[in-house]
Image: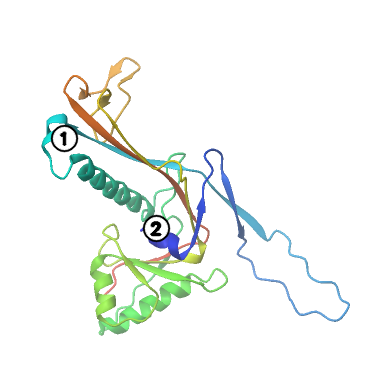
Amino acid sequence: MVSQLGMRGLRVDLPNSGRLRIPTSQTTDPPPVFIGEGDPIPARRGWLANTSLSAKKAALLSVYTNELLKRSVPTIEAVVSRMLAQDVARGIDKQLLSSNAATADAPAGILVGAIPVAAAALADPQASMVLDIGDLVGALADPAAATNPVLIANPIQATRYGFYGASGPPMIASEFVPAGTVIALDAGDFVVGYDSTSFNIDVSDESLIHESDAAEPIVDSSVIASPVRSLYQTDCAGLRLIEGLDWALTSPAAVITDVSW
Protein backbone atom coordinates (compact mmCIF):
# COMPACT_ATOMS: atom_id res chain seq x y z
CA MET A 1 0.00 0.00 0.00
CA VAL A 2 2.70 2.51 0.99
CA SER A 3 4.78 1.55 -2.04
CA GLN A 4 1.76 1.87 -4.36
CA LEU A 5 1.01 5.36 -3.07
CA GLY A 6 4.69 6.24 -3.17
CA MET A 7 4.86 5.38 -6.88
CA ARG A 8 2.08 7.92 -7.48
CA GLY A 9 3.42 10.52 -5.06
CA LEU A 10 6.88 11.62 -3.97
CA ARG A 11 9.45 9.07 -2.81
CA VAL A 12 12.59 10.27 -1.07
CA ASP A 13 15.64 8.79 0.66
CA LEU A 14 15.86 9.44 4.38
CA PRO A 15 19.16 10.30 6.08
CA ASN A 16 20.72 7.79 8.45
CA SER A 17 20.13 10.24 11.30
CA GLY A 18 18.28 13.49 11.77
CA ARG A 19 15.22 14.74 9.92
CA LEU A 20 14.54 15.48 6.28
CA ARG A 21 12.49 18.61 5.59
CA ILE A 22 10.06 18.57 2.67
CA PRO A 23 8.89 22.03 1.46
CA THR A 24 5.11 22.28 1.09
CA SER A 25 2.80 25.10 0.07
CA GLN A 26 0.25 26.70 2.35
CA THR A 27 -3.38 26.20 1.40
CA THR A 28 -4.13 29.83 0.55
CA ASP A 29 -5.50 31.41 -2.60
CA PRO A 30 -2.88 32.89 -4.95
CA PRO A 31 -2.63 36.67 -5.34
CA PRO A 32 -3.55 38.36 -8.63
CA VAL A 33 -0.91 37.39 -11.19
CA PHE A 34 -1.77 39.72 -14.10
CA ILE A 35 -0.08 43.09 -13.71
CA GLY A 36 0.52 46.13 -15.79
CA GLU A 37 3.73 47.01 -17.55
CA GLY A 38 6.27 48.36 -15.09
CA ASP A 39 4.10 47.51 -12.06
CA PRO A 40 5.63 45.62 -9.12
CA ILE A 41 5.25 41.84 -9.23
CA PRO A 42 3.34 40.40 -6.26
CA ALA A 43 5.60 38.68 -3.72
CA ARG A 44 4.27 35.61 -1.97
CA ARG A 45 4.44 35.87 1.84
CA GLY A 46 4.07 32.94 4.22
CA TRP A 47 3.60 30.64 1.24
CA LEU A 48 5.99 27.83 2.03
CA ALA A 49 5.80 25.48 4.99
CA ASN A 50 7.69 22.26 5.62
CA THR A 51 7.01 18.69 6.62
CA SER A 52 9.66 16.71 8.44
CA LEU A 53 10.38 13.03 7.90
CA SER A 54 12.65 10.79 9.96
CA ALA A 55 13.07 7.05 9.78
CA LYS A 56 10.65 5.12 12.00
CA LYS A 57 11.52 1.48 12.69
CA ALA A 58 9.16 -1.29 11.62
CA ALA A 59 10.41 -4.67 12.83
CA LEU A 60 9.42 -8.25 13.63
CA LEU A 61 11.22 -11.44 14.54
CA SER A 62 10.40 -15.15 14.47
CA VAL A 63 11.92 -18.23 16.13
CA TYR A 64 12.41 -21.72 14.71
CA THR A 65 14.39 -24.77 15.75
CA ASN A 66 17.70 -25.67 14.16
CA GLU A 67 16.29 -29.16 13.48
CA LEU A 68 13.64 -27.55 11.29
CA LEU A 69 16.32 -25.49 9.57
CA LYS A 70 18.28 -28.65 8.68
CA ARG A 71 15.28 -30.64 7.44
CA SER A 72 13.16 -28.06 5.62
CA VAL A 73 12.98 -27.72 1.84
CA PRO A 74 12.79 -24.93 0.82
CA THR A 75 14.90 -23.55 3.62
CA ILE A 76 12.92 -22.31 6.60
CA GLU A 77 14.89 -19.04 6.50
CA ALA A 78 13.46 -18.19 3.07
CA VAL A 79 9.93 -19.07 4.18
CA VAL A 80 10.13 -17.13 7.45
CA SER A 81 11.75 -14.14 5.71
CA ARG A 82 8.87 -13.97 3.24
CA MET A 83 6.26 -14.33 5.98
CA LEU A 84 7.87 -11.66 8.17
CA ALA A 85 8.10 -9.29 5.21
CA GLN A 86 4.40 -9.80 4.56
CA ASP A 87 3.51 -9.21 8.21
CA VAL A 88 5.67 -6.08 8.41
CA ALA A 89 4.03 -4.75 5.24
CA ARG A 90 0.57 -5.48 6.64
CA GLY A 91 1.46 -3.79 9.92
CA ILE A 92 2.67 -0.73 8.01
CA ASP A 93 -0.56 -0.63 5.96
CA LYS A 94 -2.67 -0.94 9.11
CA GLN A 95 -0.98 2.12 10.59
CA LEU A 96 -1.17 4.03 7.29
CA LEU A 97 -4.95 3.52 6.99
CA SER A 98 -5.69 4.39 10.60
CA SER A 99 -6.73 7.52 12.45
CA ASN A 100 -3.81 7.12 14.88
CA ALA A 101 -1.93 10.33 15.59
CA ALA A 102 1.81 10.48 14.97
CA THR A 103 4.11 9.48 17.80
CA ALA A 104 7.87 9.47 18.26
CA ASP A 105 7.83 5.87 17.00
CA ALA A 106 5.16 5.80 14.27
CA PRO A 107 3.84 8.06 11.49
CA ALA A 108 0.29 9.38 11.56
CA GLY A 109 -2.48 7.49 9.82
CA ILE A 110 -3.92 9.20 6.76
CA LEU A 111 -7.35 9.43 8.41
CA VAL A 112 -6.07 11.97 10.95
CA GLY A 113 -8.00 15.14 10.09
CA ALA A 114 -9.77 13.45 7.18
CA ILE A 115 -12.74 15.33 5.68
CA PRO A 116 -16.02 13.41 6.21
CA VAL A 117 -18.29 13.11 3.18
CA ALA A 118 -21.93 12.00 3.33
CA ALA A 119 -22.83 8.91 1.31
CA ALA A 120 -25.41 9.10 -1.46
CA ALA A 121 -28.52 6.96 -1.02
CA LEU A 122 -29.96 6.58 -4.50
CA ALA A 123 -31.96 3.55 -5.59
CA ASP A 124 -29.37 2.77 -8.27
CA PRO A 125 -26.08 1.65 -6.64
CA GLN A 126 -24.05 2.65 -9.67
CA ALA A 127 -25.52 6.16 -9.61
CA SER A 128 -24.72 6.39 -5.89
CA MET A 129 -21.15 5.30 -6.62
CA VAL A 130 -20.72 8.05 -9.21
CA LEU A 131 -21.96 10.68 -6.77
CA ASP A 132 -19.85 9.32 -3.93
CA ILE A 133 -16.64 9.31 -5.93
CA GLY A 134 -17.29 12.79 -7.28
CA ASP A 135 -17.98 14.14 -3.78
CA LEU A 136 -14.86 12.48 -2.38
CA VAL A 137 -12.57 13.90 -5.04
CA GLY A 138 -14.29 17.29 -4.79
CA ALA A 139 -13.60 17.36 -1.05
CA LEU A 140 -9.85 17.17 -1.76
CA ALA A 141 -9.83 20.68 -3.25
CA ASP A 142 -7.84 22.50 -0.57
CA PRO A 143 -7.98 25.01 -2.24
CA ALA A 144 -6.70 23.64 -5.56
CA ALA A 145 -8.28 20.54 -7.08
CA ALA A 146 -6.44 17.26 -6.49
CA THR A 147 -3.81 16.66 -9.15
CA ASN A 148 -3.55 12.89 -8.65
CA PRO A 149 -6.59 11.55 -6.75
CA VAL A 150 -6.42 7.95 -5.54
CA LEU A 151 -9.15 5.88 -3.90
CA ILE A 152 -8.62 3.23 -1.22
CA ALA A 153 -11.38 0.81 -0.26
CA ASN A 154 -12.26 -2.57 1.12
CA PRO A 155 -11.92 -5.37 -1.48
CA ILE A 156 -15.73 -5.51 -1.67
CA GLN A 157 -16.08 -1.89 -2.83
CA ALA A 158 -12.95 -2.16 -4.98
CA THR A 159 -14.42 -5.16 -6.82
CA ARG A 160 -17.76 -3.44 -7.36
CA TYR A 161 -15.99 -0.29 -8.52
CA GLY A 162 -14.29 -2.35 -11.22
CA PHE A 163 -17.46 -4.35 -11.96
CA TYR A 164 -19.40 -1.17 -12.69
CA GLY A 165 -16.79 -0.29 -15.27
CA ALA A 166 -15.68 2.82 -13.45
CA SER A 167 -13.20 4.94 -15.38
CA GLY A 168 -12.51 7.37 -12.55
CA PRO A 169 -9.48 7.61 -10.26
CA PRO A 170 -7.45 4.45 -9.59
CA MET A 171 -8.62 2.40 -6.61
CA ILE A 172 -6.42 0.35 -4.27
CA ALA A 173 -7.97 -2.47 -2.24
CA SER A 174 -6.97 -3.06 1.37
CA GLU A 175 -8.13 -5.43 4.07
CA PHE A 176 -7.70 -2.64 6.61
CA VAL A 177 -10.47 -0.46 5.21
CA PRO A 178 -13.86 -1.44 6.69
CA ALA A 179 -16.55 -2.65 4.29
CA GLY A 180 -18.61 0.28 3.06
CA THR A 181 -15.80 2.80 3.58
CA VAL A 182 -13.94 4.58 0.77
CA ILE A 183 -10.97 6.91 1.28
CA ALA A 184 -9.69 9.47 -1.21
CA LEU A 185 -6.40 11.32 -1.12
CA ASP A 186 -4.25 13.34 -3.47
CA ALA A 187 -1.23 11.16 -4.14
CA GLY A 188 0.55 14.30 -5.31
CA ASP A 189 0.56 15.37 -1.64
CA PHE A 190 1.77 12.02 -0.30
CA VAL A 191 5.46 11.79 0.58
CA VAL A 192 7.12 8.56 1.65
CA GLY A 193 10.73 8.26 2.72
CA TYR A 194 12.86 5.15 3.10
CA ASP A 195 16.13 4.67 4.90
CA SER A 196 17.87 2.56 2.29
CA THR A 197 20.51 1.42 4.78
CA SER A 198 18.02 0.16 7.36
CA PHE A 199 16.38 -2.78 5.61
CA ASN A 200 18.07 -5.91 6.84
CA ILE A 201 17.39 -9.49 7.80
CA ASP A 202 19.55 -10.98 10.55
CA VAL A 203 19.72 -14.46 12.05
CA SER A 204 21.01 -15.25 15.54
CA ASP A 205 21.16 -18.37 17.70
CA GLU A 206 22.72 -16.78 20.79
CA SER A 207 20.04 -14.31 21.90
CA LEU A 208 17.63 -14.11 24.80
CA ILE A 209 14.20 -12.93 23.69
CA HIS A 210 10.77 -12.21 25.13
CA GLU A 211 8.38 -14.31 23.05
CA SER A 212 5.39 -11.99 22.86
CA ASP A 213 3.54 -9.85 20.31
CA ALA A 214 3.87 -7.06 22.91
CA ALA A 215 7.54 -7.63 23.67
CA GLU A 216 9.07 -5.92 26.69
CA PRO A 217 12.61 -5.55 28.05
CA ILE A 218 13.89 -8.84 29.50
CA VAL A 219 14.33 -7.09 32.85
CA ASP A 220 12.76 -3.73 33.63
CA SER A 221 12.87 -2.34 37.17
CA SER A 222 13.38 -5.85 38.55
CA VAL A 223 10.35 -7.15 36.59
CA ILE A 224 11.26 -10.12 34.38
CA ALA A 225 9.41 -10.54 31.10
CA SER A 226 7.67 -13.86 30.47
CA PRO A 227 7.95 -16.13 28.58
CA VAL A 228 11.65 -15.76 27.81
CA ARG A 229 13.60 -18.07 25.51
CA SER A 230 17.33 -18.60 25.24
CA LEU A 231 17.98 -19.41 21.59
CA TYR A 232 21.35 -21.00 22.49
CA GLN A 233 19.95 -23.19 25.25
CA THR A 234 16.99 -24.42 23.21
CA ASP A 235 18.99 -24.89 19.98
CA CYS A 236 16.82 -22.40 18.10
CA ALA A 237 17.44 -19.50 15.77
CA GLY A 238 15.73 -16.15 15.55
CA LEU A 239 15.23 -14.30 12.29
CA ARG A 240 14.73 -10.54 12.54
CA LEU A 241 13.54 -8.10 9.86
CA ILE A 242 13.89 -4.32 10.24
CA GLU A 243 12.80 -1.55 7.86
CA GLY A 244 13.08 2.22 8.33
CA LEU A 245 10.51 4.51 6.74
CA ASP A 246 8.25 7.49 7.32
CA TRP A 247 5.48 9.23 5.40
CA ALA A 248 3.39 12.36 5.42
CA LEU A 249 0.19 13.52 3.73
CA THR A 250 0.41 17.28 3.30
CA SER A 251 -3.29 17.82 2.54
CA PRO A 252 -6.25 16.12 4.26
CA ALA A 253 -7.74 12.91 2.92
CA ALA A 254 -11.51 12.53 2.49
CA VAL A 255 -13.53 9.58 3.74
CA ILE A 256 -17.02 8.29 3.19
CA THR A 257 -18.69 5.51 5.19
CA ASP A 258 -21.73 3.29 4.67
CA VAL A 259 -21.79 3.52 0.90
CA SER A 260 -24.72 1.77 -0.78
CA TRP A 261 -22.67 0.03 -3.45
* Amino acid type indicated by mark 1: Leu
Neighbours of disc 2 within 10 Å: few (<14), some (14-19), many (20+): few
In which quarter of the view is residue 106 placed? Answer: top left
In which quarter of the view is residue 256 placed? Answer: bottom left
Of all residues, the one furthest to the right in this rendering is 38
Residue ID at (25%, 64%):
179
Q: CA distance from mark 1 to mark 2?
A: 32 Å
Q: Look at mark 1 in the image and give the residue it sits on.
A: 69
User: Which quarter shows the C terminus?
Assistant: bottom left
Looking at the rendered image, the disc whose residue lies closer to the viewer, 1 or 2, is 1
Where 136 sits versus 97, above or below?
below
Q: Look at mark 2 in the image and give the residue it sits on.
A: 3
Confirm whether residue 224 shows in the render.
yes
Residue 37 placement (x, y as % from top left): 86, 81
Where 111 sits versus 69, above or below?
below
Residue 49 placement (x, y as % from top left): 63, 55
Residue 227 placement (x, y as % from top left): 20, 25
Neighbours of disc 1 within 10 Å: few (<14), some (14-19), many (20+): some
* Amino acid type indicated by mark 2: Ser
**Residue closer to the observer: 238 or 27:** 238
Q: Secondary structure at mark 2?
A: helix
Residue 88 placement (x, y as % from top left): 31, 46
Q: Secondary structure at mark 1?
A: helix
**Residue closer to the observer: 234 or 144:** 234
Residue ID at (41%, 53%):
109
